[in-house]
Image (cartoon, rainbow, N blue to C red):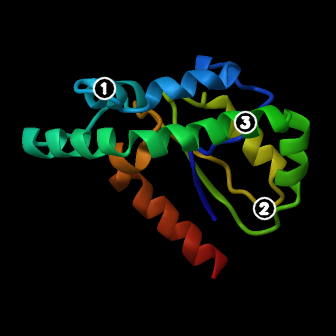
Amino acid sequence: MLLVDSAGVYQSANTPYLKDTTQLKDLVVRKTGDFDKLMNLVMQSPPFIPVELRVAQEKLMIQQSANTYKMVEQLVTMSKLYTPDSFALIARGLEQPVFIVWGKQDKIINVEAAYELKNLLKNAEPPLILEGIGHMPILEAEQLMVQPYLKFLQKIK
């Protein structure tokens, strides 16, 4: 299993978005300009995206904002149903091998959560913490993830 800056209800939560999950609603792209704000918030090192693609992506996200908002509302509701203890109980029940990747500069889910998650899981590798990377390692640093993840996959074969 691959977990990348994984959502959860963490004891070590210390970002505004985990302390008050209603703030996640601010991450929904609803109007022009929101996409760039979102990229700058969730990424420490946003990749180059040509203007045409950025504009098209923002339009698509604006069109989908109602559904995205509903999904965020469900996350907020779930965060109220679970506590760090109940989340830990569920996590401890997972038996499969787990590879955890986290951006050290994640502003949404602080990096300490990666270590907490590793300690909860029975069969997790030490987290791969990527320096200078935010909440989206797959977009920011896919090349830094590939080799360690492939080694993990070989190991569990």
Mark number displayed over residue 11: none
Q: Amino acid at mark 3?
A: Thr
Residue at x-position 91% and y-position 37%: 85
Dot 3 falls on a residue whose secondary structure is helix
Residue type at mark 1? Asp
* Place of residue 103 in the rendered image (x, y in percent of width and height, measured from the top left): 49, 37
Q: How far across and how far down the image is residue 45, in percent? A: 31, 32
The answer to whether 13 appears left or right of 94 in the picture is: left
Residue on which the image places disc 1: 34
Label disc, if present, on residue 77 of the rendered structure = 3
Q: Is residue 24 left or right of residue 64?
A: right
| Dot placed on the residue nearer the N-terminal end, 1 or 3 | 1
Question: Taking 11 as reference, is 50 above or below it?
Answer: below
Q: Is residue 79 left or right of residue 71?
A: right
Residue 52 in picture, x, y percent from top left: 8, 43
Nearest the eye: 59 or 19: 59
Q: Quadrant of the N terminus?
A: bottom right
Separation (CA) of disc 2 from disc 1: 39 Å
Which residue does the numbered mark 2 point to in the structure image?
A: 123
Q: Is residue 119 above or below residue 26?
A: below
